[in-house]
Amino acid sequence: MSQDDAAQVFALEALDLQASIERNLLDLSEDPSNRDLIDTLFRELHTLKGSSAMFGFTALSRFVHEFETAFETLREPGGRASADLVAVALAACDHFERLLTAPEKAGPDSEAILHRLRLSLGGGYGESSQVSFQGDVPPDLSVNAHTSAGPAQGTGQGDSPLADGWTIRLALGPQALSLGINPLGVLDDLRGLSADADIRILCDKTITLDALDPLEPPFAWEIRLPATVERAQLDDVFLFVSDDLSLDIRRAGTQAPDGVVEDQRHTEHPVPGATSPVTPLPPAAAGSDTETLRSRQQAPSSMRVETERLDELMDRVGELVIAEARLHEISADLGNGALLTIAEDIRRLTSGMRDTTMTIRMVPVGSLFGRCRRLVHDLSGQLGKPLDLVTTGGDTELDKTVIEALGDPLVHMLRNSVDHGIELPEVRRAAGKPDHGQITIAARQAGTEVEITIADDGKGLDLEKIRERAIERGLIQPTDHQSETQTRLLIFEPGFSTAPSVTELSGRGVGMDVVRTTLKALRGQIEVDSEPGHGTTIKLRLPLTLAIMDGLLVEVGTERYTIPLAAVEECVELPGELATGRGQSNFLRVRDELVPFLSLARLFDVPEPRAQWQKVVIVSSAAGRVGLLVDRIVSTNQTVIKQLSRLHEGLKNFSGATILGDGKVALILDVSNLVGHGQAIEAAARQSERAA
């Protein structure tokens, strides 16, 4: 791997680390004294700083160093993160990406954020931590980090805090620089352990320029640290670089290294002035490090793959599924036993490959929750509305294509809920509600769908105001009679907004239009429910996958249709007393429950004759269940989903099409829409009963 490739990999990993830091900062804002969170954040910042320095992102490394120092102070007993510190740390988290992509332009913003950091800590924490970001010039390592005057400073004598502390002598190994070790990062880590750190350059010989090897500098460093620094902290600094350094760590004023044994790996490049080059880790630490290495080797490994390659793999698997179906059809027609056996083996392997590929593409919905959480946190402070965000079902998985497309709609719905739905604290108090508003995001799988619910406990939708604004914009006529459901859906019309003026958050009528457009492209559905004074609930129903699924092939007349197998509950035979006429819509008693059923022949206007023994396929979605009356159940198959063209967007009962093994096309039924038909039948029947 080239250095450029390694830097790109690090940049991707840094973004993952950035997301983790953001999550932990949001947790810390809710529990400012949580020591585990503070320690975790310190470790993450330390890792980001060290890794960025190793891969040449020195501006990021020095920027993170100050935040690492700030969180180091919180690790003291009684440490508590203030709201200001968390806020500036979140701003710094946003700034990390810019320092990765355009560090040369990020200097002024870096200085501004660090200034806010010092103010949040009460005006600063020492001159040694204040780094200039004008340019990308490394600090002068020959200058002592500890600059205050004092008797015998740095000599280990008198009343200096370094008198009984640590003395570390450090030199680079013969291949340290060529292997990517960055001594600046190591020295920064040591300097960050204490404001009293004293760092000096050691050089016991003069060398001509012609003889200078830039990969093997002829100097070393001596670092003095106070006794308040623990040995474990030193071990953390040298944990990943000890094999490429010559080290001598000992208590100041002693002749023997502290708790370490001599190691002759770097004797050809000894530390100037040192008598015994040694490793930084004591035997106990080395043993635990071995255990850590063994556990890492046993842990599942992973690698990053470009999204385009996954898409291409999915397309190839889809074509393979179609070819396999064709092979199985031909082998069955020929009746050749050996060929049938091979076809079955290929079907089994294809099915396994399909399942594995689909698993790779599935992503937990919870990956979106972190983004939502940060958004709610920021909007809460911006609008002065205390908010709690509750999320459930984060482990529910969706196709990565759906997850990627769902990000913006979720943002728009949350902004809408906070801005239009949640009231100000004094208004909530007057209405008998708690000051803190609550927004809930829940996800669950139901058959072939995933239902995502966004609910708030705000003031709800003002249907009369929505209707008035719709009339003003010409979306409906004053004489139009619309149900409450139809009126609520007007908020998704392009340009529609009930906001009195345009603000940074709302007023242009674009956000909810984005939601509807995206859901339409994903073959999803939207439902809105609202109760005045008690909040609004928006339900998104999305297909589990957009690529390949198991299907149940059924026949109605001479036409074949595919039903998503995951939506099928059971298949029953239609009782003779119900098989009247062309299959009028009716109810079927299944397991002591009445289930409405639809005649697909009547719905799709399929001509007679009907099969003598018709079957009812009971299907379900998040909204309920319905029976589908078909003439014959053919088989189960692997269904490669092909999108319908724009000319067929009005066919609401179909979600796509697939190619069968004989080369013919079968339409895929949209279970959610058919369940809606069934619910309409049930509602009409109940209304008739009430009228009677």
Image (cartoon, rainbow, N blue to C red):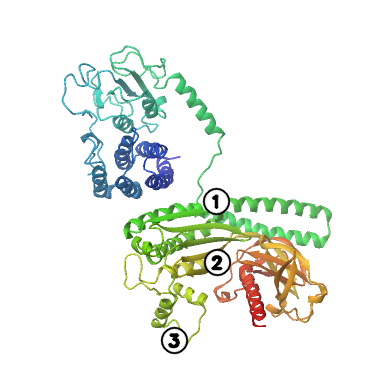
| Observer able to see residue 334 | yes
Amino acid bearing label 2: Gly
Secondary structure, mark 2, is: loop
- Residue topped by disc 3: 478
Amino acid bearing label 1: Asp
Residue lying at 40% horizontally and 75% vertically, measured from the top left? 496
Q: Measuring from the top left, give residue 350's x and y in whole percent.
A: 68, 53
Q: Are marks 1 and 3 in contact (CB under 8 Å)?
A: no
* Mark whose residue sits in front, 2 or 3: 3
Compare residues 514 and 672 and report the one nearer the observer: 672
Number of numbered labels in the structure image? 3
Residue 395, label in figure = 1
Secondary structure, mark 3, is: loop
Residue 417 lies in quadrant: bottom left
CA separation, marks 1 and 2? 20 Å
Residue lying at 40% horizontally and 77% vertically, measured from the top left? 465
Earlier in the chain: of badge 1 and badge 3, it is: 1
- Residue topped by disc 2: 524
Pointer 3: residues within 10 angstroms few (<14), some, or many (20+)?
A: few
